[in-house]
Amino acid sequence: MSARIDVDRLFGALRRVLLTLVGLQLAIAVGMSLVDSYRRRGKKAKPFPVSPPQTVSVGDGTVTIYTYGRDLYDDMIAAIEGAQRQVLFETYIWKGDETGERFKKALSDAAARGVEVYCIYDGFANLVVSPVFKHFPSSMKVLRYPVYAAGWRFLDLRRYGRDHRKILVVDDDTGFVGGYNIGSAYETEWRDTHVRITGSGVWDLKRAFADFWNLHRRRRLRHSERPLLLETASTWEPSIRVQRNVPRLWMFPIRSMYIEAINRASRNVWMTQAYFLPDQDFVDAMRDAARRGVDVRLLLPLKSNHIVADWISRGYFSQLLESGVKILRYRDAMVHAKTATVDGTWCTVGTANIDRLSLQGNYEINVEVIDESMSKVLESVFAVDESNCLPLTRGEWEARDLHRKWTELILAPLRPLL
């Protein structure tokens, strides 16, 4: 009887310790977020170097690379205004500010002149957007992906992913995809990357939109909503592949795409990420590449818009630096791009961050391109971004303050949640 009481006491003590640690982690995370939010009030991003839009021929079409929001938005609006038959528009964040209103007007005007307009936005990401902004003309077909999508299937993890994609397809011949959300701050204050695709590569973007719409269309008010049918036949462009994470179908190819490319690298791996919280296998792939002589560079924000993610990300720096990976910290502005180039031949631009939510949770989409001309452009973009970075040396990292090491250690268990 005494032994049983001792065991019960031991388990009780362990539970209390565990709850204390979890509470401490959450308290630190919330406290850091509040302090960081207060410090950012009224602050504007400083000017940062950008590359002008550059267009290259890929397969039977073209790819244009954008690194500045204003350039991108102007071309997206022009494409919508020139639409003749159909517009498919999908975004994670759609701010109700001047830029958001500009897109809303262009889309509603297109619908008013008889163009089929389909729109998708994520309900959770736009909780703080005014409900007034979310009232759309009946001529537009709008799907608000719900804040909670699991319904009564509480334990079905396939139904908890957010719609983190950003897609625009106009009239079968022009498609846009990349990291840019829709909002005034993103137009001038964030450094992001987006691409415009023409040619047969657009078909996969259209199919990606249609598949998502058809999978979730019954969440619209009209339960008899007809499916979005593709009127053009599938065409294959061997230089371009669209990789889609679809949690509902338990499909997550983007992580595999990255790891395979890194494992095949023989010359260089240059990667830009907004948030970097990989699993250990991903880290090992980067370390192995660096150890076999590959020039591995990782470009991250010096300070992102999610301070907790920054601190958790730093927990990987020791391993990477020890292996020879170069870590570059982008200063003065938020770099939100999700891009990579390998060996001057393979490259990707898309919506997926290197974290659990993107690689194993959310609806994401990345364009994978095997083309030397596009890889060369992205390498030149990387070089411009690198000119605005502070490199992190191994000595500097090892000399960081004790309180920083302690905070990283305490927050480390939160990695699987992000």
Image: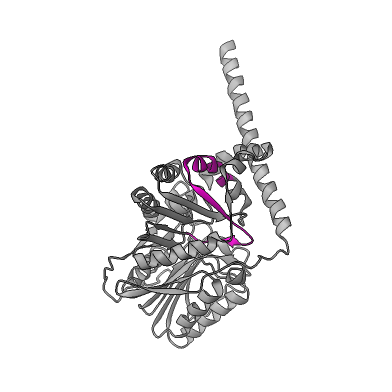
Please tell me which residue is depicted at 64% across the width and 61% down the height of the picture.
332
Q: Position of residue 388 (x, y in %)?
A: 58, 61
Hey, which residue is sitting farthest bottom in the picture?
113
Residue most extreme to the top: 2
The verdict on residue 321 being magenta is: yes
- The image position of residue 231, as x and y in percent, is 30, 76
Q: Position of residue 365 (x, y in %)?
A: 42, 61
On the picture, is 248 further left or further right than 51?
left
Residue 9 can be seen, yes or no: yes
* Residue 205: quadrant of the picture: bottom left
For residue 407, above or below residue 56? above
Taking 112 as reference, is 238 above or below it? above
Identify the residue at horizontal 60%, vertical 71% (top origin). 188
Of residues 41 and 317, the one nearer the viewer is 317
For the question of whether residue 1 can be seen, the reply is no
- 43 to the left or right of 119: right
Q: Give the residues in magenta.
A: 312-338
- The residue lying toward the viewer, choosing from 399 and 42, is 399
Residue at image location 35% in from the left, 65% down from the top: 372
